[in-house]
Image: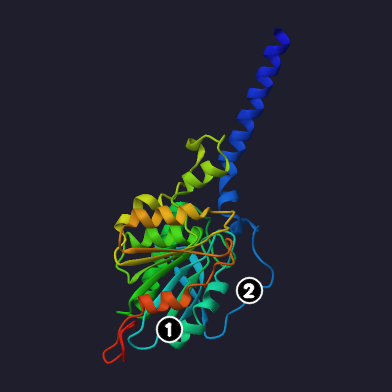
């Protein structure tokens, strides 16, 4: 009996230690790109057509950004990358192809604590990063409509900004309903109360105005396709959900032509997308 009690106490102690470590270091897992993990090789550099800029947050942090000004009368894609990525791929994407041909501008930022940016990541911090990026676009391109785009964690940032500021629409790729639900699905034995950043997009999506396009890969092992479908249902009839072949990364850009036509601001004399010339 005494031995059993000792074993039980040791097991409880080890469990408490593991849970304590998870609580203290969970942001290393949630935001791996800020701690040197998850970043691809050879992604740094300034993509053609963009310039490196500094975006300053309300609390004085300095964020690395990549900016392309829009053509007169066109919009700006404010894009937010995933938790293990960098802004360069999105900046290159939205500065080329259908987006460049239609005259869009873009801003892609590195979150606080990610390479090139000061500070450290948290839910409140990333939302302020998004707000600072929004203010930057508004000052650099006054009056330009802003399309909010995000992939994975970046989709949660885009939804949070959309719930606070006027915008042209939301273009989300592989979003989650909430981080709390996602963590619960992957790690069902972990107590939900340990999660410091819950990222409740399900509670915020209702505050976003305008049209919403959600694209999700059918074979996404990171964020199951049900998250994208459920988030679209929560947004209501203004949201369009599209499932595409692919995983968490290969889905990127598959619906760019549709998205550009859907959200394109109409200038006087321009044909309206979908209408005959």
Res 59 seen here: no
Residue extending farthest to the left is: 268
Q: In this view of the protein, which residue sits in the foreground, 92 or 177?
A: 177
Residue extending farthest to the top is: 1
The location of residue 216, given as percent across then percent down, is 50, 61
* Disc on res. 44: 2
**Which residue is painted at 49% across and 37% down in the image?**
192
**Would you identify the image quadrant in which residue 47 lies?**
bottom right
Label 2 Cα neighbours within 10 Å, binned few <14 / some 14-19 / many ≥20: few
* Disc on res. 69: 1
Label 1 Cα neighbours within 10 Å, binned few <14 / some 14-19 / many ≥20: many
The location of residue 30, given as percent across then percent down, is 56, 51
**Above/below status of 176 relative to 11:** below
Q: Are marks 1 and 2 in contact (CB under 8 Å)?
A: no
Q: Quadrant of the N terminus?
A: top right
**Which residue is painted at 44% across and 62% down in the image?**
129
């Amino acid at each position: 009996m005494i031995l059993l009690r000792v074993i039980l106490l040791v097991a409880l102690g080890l469990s408490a230690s593991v849970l304590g470590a998870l609580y203290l270091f969970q942001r290393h897992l949630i935001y791996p790109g800020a701690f040197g993990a998850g970043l691809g090789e050879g992604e740094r550099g300034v993509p053609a057509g963009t310039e490196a800029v500094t975006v300053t947050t309300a609390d004085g942090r300095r964020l690395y950004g990549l900016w392309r000004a829009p053509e007169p009368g066109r919009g700006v894609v404010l894009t937010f990358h995933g938790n293990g990525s960098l802004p360069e791929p999105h900046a290159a994407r939205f500065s080329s192809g259908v987006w460049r041909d239609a005259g869009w501008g873009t801003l892609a930022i590195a979150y606080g604590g990610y390479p090139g940016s000061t500070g450290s990541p948290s839910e409140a911090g990333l939302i302020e990063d998004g707000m600072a990026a929004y203010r930057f676009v508004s000052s650099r391109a006054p009056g330009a409509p802003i399309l909010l785009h995000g992939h994975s964690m970046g989709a949660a940032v885009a939804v949070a900004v959309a719930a606070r500021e006027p915008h042209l629409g939301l273009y989300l790729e592989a979003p989650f309903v909430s981080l709390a639900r996602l963590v619960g699905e992957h790690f069902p034995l972990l107590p939900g109360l340990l999660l410091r950043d819950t990222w409740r997009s399900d509670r915020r999506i209702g505050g976003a105005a305008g049209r919403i396009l959600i694209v999700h890969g059918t074979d996404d092992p990171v964020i199951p396709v049900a998250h994208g479908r459920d988030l679209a249902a929560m947004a209501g009839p203004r949201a369009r959900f599209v499932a595409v072949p692919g995983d968490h990364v290969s889905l990127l850009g598959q619906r760019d032509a549709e998205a550009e036509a859907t959200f394109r601001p109409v200038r006087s004399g321009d044909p309206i997308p979908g209408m005959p010339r």
